[in-house]
Amino acid sequence: MPSPQIQFPANFTTASAIAFTNPDGSVQLVSADNPVPVTMTGGGGGSGGGLTDAELRAVPVPVSLSSFGGVTDVQLRAAPLPVSLSNANGLTDGQLRAAPVAVSLPSWDGLTDTQLRASPVLVSLSGFGGLTETQLRATPVAVSLASFGGLTDTQLRASPVGVATDAVADALRTSGSVTSAAALVSVATTGFNGGSFHVTSAGTTCTITYEQSNDNSTWVALPVISLASATATPVLTTTAAGIYGFATSAAYVRARVSTYTSGTVALTLAQKRQGPATSGLSLAGGSAALGSVSVSGTATVSGTTNAGTGFTDSTTALAGGASFTGTGRATTTSSQYAYFHAVAYADQSGTLFIDQSLDSGATYQPVASQAVTASAPAQLTARLTGAFAATTLYRVRYVNGATAQATFRLSSAFSR
């Protein structure tokens, strides 16, 4: 409509302007600070007063949409990108993260305004709260997901690694009892690596058989071991009460009464996410032994292996200037050794030698020697060299000084 002529006192000039009437009847000029108020609470097409996203963003004046997705005027005006409010309160993930002001979604999976705005990663709320494990771990504030695998808010926030979402609790227990030849328990092992069968009642002359399967149809034996014995060996069946551990990578395990006589047979199966290695032989605290150990190739060692082989070469005193020559020791049976040692003691001075032969004892050459002081022990060592065969020999030799001995001790040994 035409702008009305506004009369002012004589010291003002007349002007044409847009104006509107305030609730109290006074005239209000339209300016940048006083835009025309527009109210759109209904009408038009759709639930938003018939305005499209582009039209809402282009409106330069306050818009009241109090019932439109719970978003206030201030929030709409402040949104830096298109806002679509067609479903689920109309806000996309990107819009939520970009919104510079509070977004009120108190009933949306329990997430508060602060939590949505603070989330440093993409938040998708399409399924179970829409949060992946990575997003949960990265969330800097409390997330309430009490029904998510039994994990509390504190546990989720504190988890520095992946949170298992299979809702598998450690030490899951399954119990069963029978009074006939039948299955006691049969369970899937998803999320578990082993566990233990606790037989609380073995009945009278009954046999329990333990089995495993990948198809829950074809069963093979499952070795178990008594956890109450330090020297137990794995077994496939039991007839007495006790706790029997197992480890398996099969998809299913079961325990069944294969032979029944009378009474009640009962047990409880506890499954562990990280089962112990219980399928081997225990050597702890008992008399169990490994038996024979064979090394393929050049040697077989059976029974007890000595750390060395020693010899007493002589205890007979020598005359002045006399000598003693020990027996040549072949390295044929000494291939596990690395040294030949000689020890001498005499009440008179002399010289101790170790000789080596490479021609089956036909000739010897000294490979080590040491002067012996009267009444003082002497020790001499030579590293074994040459072929470990009958042709390679080592011996001890002693040459006395000019004075006859009253005491003489000479010994030698192979060692590792």
Image (cartoon, rainbow, N blue to C red):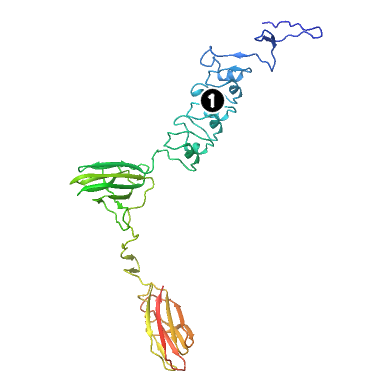
Q: Quadrant of residue 392?
A: bottom left
Position above or below: 251 against 287:
above
Residue assigned mark 1: 104
Amino acid carrying label 1: it is Ser
Side of 147 where 199 appears, left or right: left
Disc tally is 1
Near-viewer residue (217 or 270): 270
Q: Quarter holding the C terminus?
A: bottom left
Near-viewer residue (91 or 117): 117
Residue positioned most to the left: 261
Q: Quarter holding the N terminus?
A: top right
Near-viewer residue (202 or 336): 202
Q: Position of residue 103 (x, y in %)?
A: 55, 26
Which residue appears at 61% of the width and 14% of the height? 38
Residue positioned most to the right: 11
Q: Secondary structure at mark 1?
A: loop
Q: Position of residue 5 (x, y in %)?
A: 73, 5
Camera sees residue 113: yes
Q: Position of residue 113 (x, y in %)?
A: 54, 29
